[in-house]
Image (cartoon, rainbow, N blue to C red):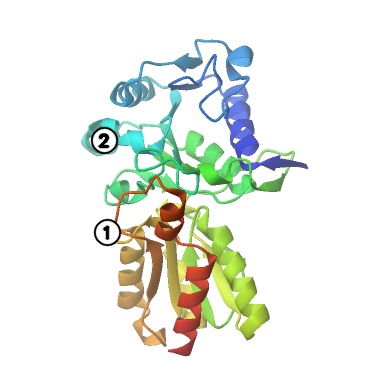
Amino acid sequence: MSELTYLEAIRQGLWEEMKRDERVFCLGEDIGVYGGAFKVTKGLIEEFGPRRVIDTPLAESAIIGVSIGAALMGMRPVAEMQFADFISCGFNQIVNNAAKIHYRWGAPVPITIRCPSGGNVHGGPFHSQNPEAWFFHVPGLKLVAPSTPYDAKGLLKAAIRDDNPVLYFEHKYLYRRIKGEIPSDDYVVPIGKGNIVREGTDATIITYGAMVHSSLEAAERLSQEDGVEVEVLDLRSLLPFDKELLLQSVRKTGRVLIVHEATRTGGIGGELGTILAEEAFEYLDAPVRRVTALDTPVPYSPPLEKFFLPDVKKILQALRELVRY
């Protein structure tokens, strides 16, 4: 057992999978000699060489296209988008090729696309987005969003071993800000399984990524200040998501707050809320609430970014309103 940062856990997972399976290789902009924009891939080129740690041109469409071709030839590529925002340049390759090839002729497409995402890093509108909802609507893709070092490593291993294209959303704000115990033995976190990270009886927060930590802090404060016990459900896997766990929690608490850092309209929270209305309506004691980012581009200004993003204060206010309903 060792204690690693979120970033170190991702690196260790990638390293171990490349050691375990010679078909695994990684490619992306500046991931080799430079070690990646955030140093996630630091040391990999020295260990595995430039044939398995490939520095590419600045062309996301080409990176993903090469990955698809390699996957069809039996390889297991791990493609890095330097920032998740840039994935839009490879949209056609993901949505119209990677997601549909298995449906068209039955071939597996085992590619993992690493997507450093999220705000609170003062990166502005082109380096801080949370674009997971763009792909939530696409059959044939899997989406994961780890919130802890344990899940970051376990979900990356699961993604690499999966025969389907997996988009792996790693939150930049968490890279060096959180640490966690990592088992020395090999393990995976199954895709499609959520996790109750805090038990409660009065309300449920459904969330993922960095917002898990904000939600836990809000839940603890509400417990201490108001005596209200909130359950916090970490989705971990966005597509497929653990519907049964959601319904189980909501049937127990009767109140739901969905929290995500992505913008509100068309976000994943809307779909989750609809499912709860369809399948757990009789258990709800209040309307489903959401706390999300505002429907604007991510601001450059740090004070405006803080106003734009969800935080502990906003979650706490929404919880109090929900419980009083």
Indicate the quadrant where residue 269 lies: bottom left
Residue 130 image label: none
Using the image, determine if residue 241 lies above or below residue 28: below
Q: Secondary structure at mark 1?
A: loop
Indicate the quadrant where residue 186 lies: top right
Furthest-top residue in view? 50
Report the front residue among 141 and 272: 272
Instruction: Give x and y (percent) for residue 289.
Output: 39, 75
Q: Quadrant of the C terminus?
A: bottom left
Instruction: Give x and y (percent) for residue 259.
Output: 44, 64
Q: Is residue 232 visible?
A: yes
Report the front residue among 299 and 325: 299
State the CA–CA distance, disc 1 to disc 2. 18 Å
Q: Is residue 164 visible?
A: no
Report the front residue among 177 and 267: 177
Sequence-wise first label, 1 or 2: 2
Residue type, numbered disc 2? Phe
Residue 91 image label: 2
Label 2 environment density (alpha carbons within 10 Å; few <14, some 14–19, many ≥20): some
Instruction: Give x and y (percent) for residue 143.
Output: 41, 46
Residue type, numbered disc 1? Gly
Furthest-right residue in view? 1
Instruction: Give x and y (percent) for residue 108.
Output: 35, 32
Left or right of residue 30: residue 220: right
Task: Name the residue that disc number 1 marks.
Answer: 266
Q: At 34% from the left edge and 33% from the top edge, which residue is drawn?
A: 86
Q: At 27% from the left edge and 59% from the top edge, which residue is drawn?
A: 266
Left or right of residue 105: residue 20: right
Q: At 35% from the left edge and 38% from the top edge, which residue is drawn?
A: 126
